[in-house]
Amino acid sequence: MNPVKALENHRQAVWLDFLARGFVANGDLKRLIETDGVKGVTSNPSIFEKAIGSSDEYDGAIGQALKKGDRSVADLFEHLAVEDIQHAADVLRPVYDKSHGGDGFVSLEVSPYLAMDTKGTIAEAERLWKDVHRKNLMVKVPATPEGLPAIEYLIGEGISINITLLFSQQVYRQVAEAYLKGLEKYVAKGGDPSHIASVASFFVSRIDSAVDKQLDEKIAKANDPHEKERLAALKGKVAIANAKLAYQDYKRLFSGARWDKLKAKGAKPQRLLWASTGTKNKDYSDVLYVEELIGPDTVNTVPPATLDAFRDHGKVRDSLEENVDDARHVLEELEKSGISLDAITEELVKDGVKLFADAADKLYGAVAHKRATSLGGGIDHQKLALGATIGKAVEKSAEEWRASAKIRRLWQKDKSIWTGDDENKWLGWLTSAASADVADYEDFAQRVKWQNFTDAVVLGMGGSSLGPEVLAQTFPHRTGFPRLHVLDSTDPAQVRAMEEYVDISRTLFIVSSKSGGTTEPNVMKDYFFDRVAKAIGKELAGHRFIAVTDPGSSLQKVAIKQGFARIFYGDPAIGGRYSVLSPFGLVPAAAAGIDVRSLLGHTLAMVRSCGADVPPQENPGVQLGLAMGIAGLDGRDKVTIFSSPDVADFGAWAEQLIAESTGKDGKGLTPIEGETIGDAAVYGNDRFFIDLRTEGEHDAAHEAKLAALEAAGHPVVRIVMKSIDHIGQEFFRFEIATAVAGSILGINPFNQPDVEAAKIKTRELTAAFEKTGSLPAEQPVVSADGVDLYTDAQNAEDLRKAGANGDLNSWIKAHLSRSGRGDYVALLAYIERDGDTIDAMQAMRLKVRDAKHLATCAEFGPRFLHSTGQAYKGGPDSGVFLQVTTDDGHDLAVPGQKASFGVIKAAQARGDFDVLTERGRRALRVHLKGDLASGLAALDAAISAALN
Ligand SMILES: O=P(O)(O)OC[C@H]1O[C@](O)(CO)[C@@H](O)[C@@H]1O
Ligand SMILES: O=C[C@H](O)[C@H](O)COP(=O)(O)O
């Protein structure tokens, strides 16, 4: 007789420790049921990893599933697993029916990531039970301290459970107790226990592997030949002895008055199931863990190779209760040898959880890869060319992130990923896209449309303006909707330019400020409210304003008082620079008629790609973040962003995100935005390049330059977006990347400690103005033709030593001569930002870059104060700052206060400069008197002269 089939005669059920789609579909499982009398199937994360992860058998099914709509990697896996389990359960259903629910089960394990999480295990087990929806399902729950209460609870809910990762007799007794208690609860609720089944999967071969290892070490150390022999005799014996003794417990636990009561109600005993019965040590018989554990009312789940071997040469006998005393003796001998089985089994549970988690990581990684392949252009493409050193370091770090579950912990808001400060309170952006109220945005968009506005102007700074600016500049104007603009300045000329550009009586103003307390949006609002009131009447003015702000802010109060048309509330768990996928970006988007549903739909594909269930190796956000962080630590801390014409403004948004998040505590990444691409020779070894473009924008000349940078050994990341509609994917990718880079750098990526310092100084200066009618006097270090130069005593002394004397050229030359390798030169201009001034600034910065091979920044104040300003003051001391201020020929009054726009801007520039110099940074201020264009030309000439 077939030895496998013969086990039936010894009342032992053989289950198969294997599952794969084709195996069930092509009838192999059915055949084993018929020929070998196989009565069940078990699966675990390693089995699914082999089935799904290491084959292409499931690719079609993955494609099919995704056709119905994208889903997360965990969902996708679960969908496949549930289908497989259902198919196997259906094939085994006749066995289940014939044995009246005694056999014919298929087991599906809860995620190993939940092994230490009782609530999570319960929720997942209940979900799987519902989704699989088969009576002959067993949900596998590990026998960890957190698993035990879940087991009791789930049994109490009438769910059949297979307890896995069970190694010790003591834990086995707790498992049986959990089962009994669960049954008692179920019965007490009036449930019929006859349909509940449970097995306690007692692991075998892994024990021998662990014990034998320690025995070998002892044997190697022992001098006495008898001792060596005694120890050697224990090898390959302990696992079986342990299992045999557990069986003795089983007999005791499932007999007696307590059990009889349950039995009378129809309860079934929880059978012991021998798991891990594939022989690991080639020196042992390949059927060892079957032959030695045959006994009534037990199960042995065997891998296919063991099944084949046993069918071929297995010998059947009632072995389980043979020599029970010898088994005790084996364990005593082991204890005597100084090897603790308790310690080993405890370790094996931890190890088992880890091994299954490792397998799940591999499996999820493979599913993530298949999902990405199947979605193709649905997810923007990212290619990292990092060079050998950084590339290897990123690989190593990715593995470290995987092994310590950091991406899962990030999503679980575990602040220990960063500095352990308050990072957990700032992670609302992870879920803001998924939880957005799309219908409300659509309704709002319709209402805006009905009002026939010509323009919509966002009044805000930093995180409240840069996201909307990207949207305004990236998406074309939608007919029927207002044109979207952003104003983020206190420069009188710039405020006036906006006023002149729009039709005040037909414009919607979106006042955006998370805190509500930021100076610029408040004064801009006061100004335009006054103008609108003058144009259409005070009572109606509020109808043209909406506010986006966090609940309880001062802006909320003002908006209510002034009768704003609507207030949208932000999430206080999201910092400004991470807020674009929340009302701060989505309200302006909706107002401009951008399809918010489609924007978020595309975004969510990237959110899923960067999910907790996507291991670092396959996770595009984590990959980018690790690369940025590691390159930064390696001295390549100038993150240089090239954005193609269609997404040209993206860099301005990313710049704030990266600078304000990472630039602090003297560390950080300095974003370099807006530099046109140059030849490899103009760059120092402090660069890290990110190139972003849409698929349709292939520019051969640009690509050739990029390839040259890569060839010259610079790390280059290329991101190709399917189209501008995917811009949300990049917002989210960069957010995750920045958070990850922050972890690598060891900073809190969600605070901005140094911005506050400049704000305080500015407030002091404007308060002085309100009191006295003028800003405190200041003394230039030099007054030359058309310019005044200012700096603090230390900088002045250093500059004079470096050759600065009576004219502008000498000061600029001395200042630039202080910059060297690894530094960046930043032009910080508190002037109107328009096409001409942008061009003038660009010309100057590129001259510096090309002559000195240094990274350069060209920023406009006060805009940059809410963006890169944090990094300039708090980041690495590698900046050389040239502040540019100007007389504001035509100042503009702010209604209701003495300080005009010009005064506020001047106070902001001084506050900023004072903090820079207080921090010992290299800074020089050039104040241009008279006409701005001539002043900028003179500065340009001085820079040229200095560089020659
Ligand atoms: O939205 P708020 O509160 O006006 O802040 C605007 C910006 O100012 C900052 O706080 C820096 O000053 C940024 O972080 C923020 O995006
Ligand atoms: O339920 C089955 C177990 O997961 C399986 O038997 C473990 O076997 P292994 O130790 O060979 O991985």
Image (tube, grey):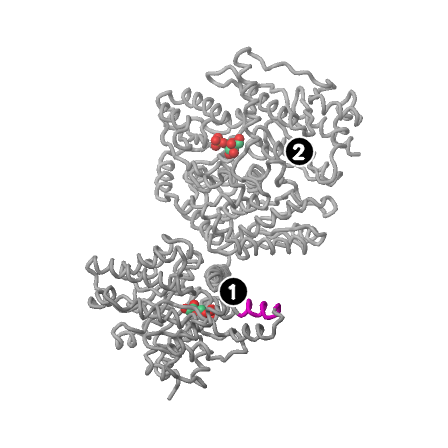
Pick the front one: 427 or 694: 427
For residue 713, side relative to residue 468 (left or right): right
Place of residue 239 in the rendered image (x, y in percent of width and height, measured from the top left) = 46, 71
Identify the amino acid type marked 2.
Ala
* 844 left or right, relative to 901: right
Q: Residue at x 30, y 76 (%)?
A: 95
The C terminus sits in image quarter = top right
10 Å crowding of disc 2: few (<14), some (14-19), many (20+): many
Pick the quarter of the image with the N terminus: bottom left
Q: Main secondary structure of the magenta part?
A: helix
Task: State the SS at label 1.
Answer: loop
Question: In the figure, residue 31 lies in which quadrant?
Answer: bottom left
The residue where tag 1 is placed is 339
As drawn, the label of residue 826 is 2
- The percent position of residue 440, horizontal first and vertical second, equals 35, 41
Residue segment shown in magenta = 212-221
Total of numbered circles in the picture?
A: 2
> Residue 752 in the image: x percent, y percent?
54, 34
Queried whether the magenta region covers residue 266, the answer comes back as: no
Nearest to the eye among marks 2 and 1: give it: 1
Q: Residue at x 66, y 19 (%)?
A: 930
Q: CA distance from mark 2 to mark 1?
A: 66 Å
**155, 441: nearer the viewer:** 155
Judge whether 288 appears above or below 684 on screen. Answer: below
**Is any part of residue 674 visible from this angle?**
yes
Q: Residues within 10 Å of mark 1 (few under 14, many from 20)?
A: some
Give the numbered dot on residue 885. none
Indicate which disc, 2 or 1, sits on the residue closer to the N terminus: 1
In depth, the one of 592 and 626 nearer the eye is 626
**Dot 2: what SS?**
strand
Q: Is residue 215 magenta?
A: yes
Which of the two residues, 187 or 371, is positioned nearer the viewer here?
A: 187
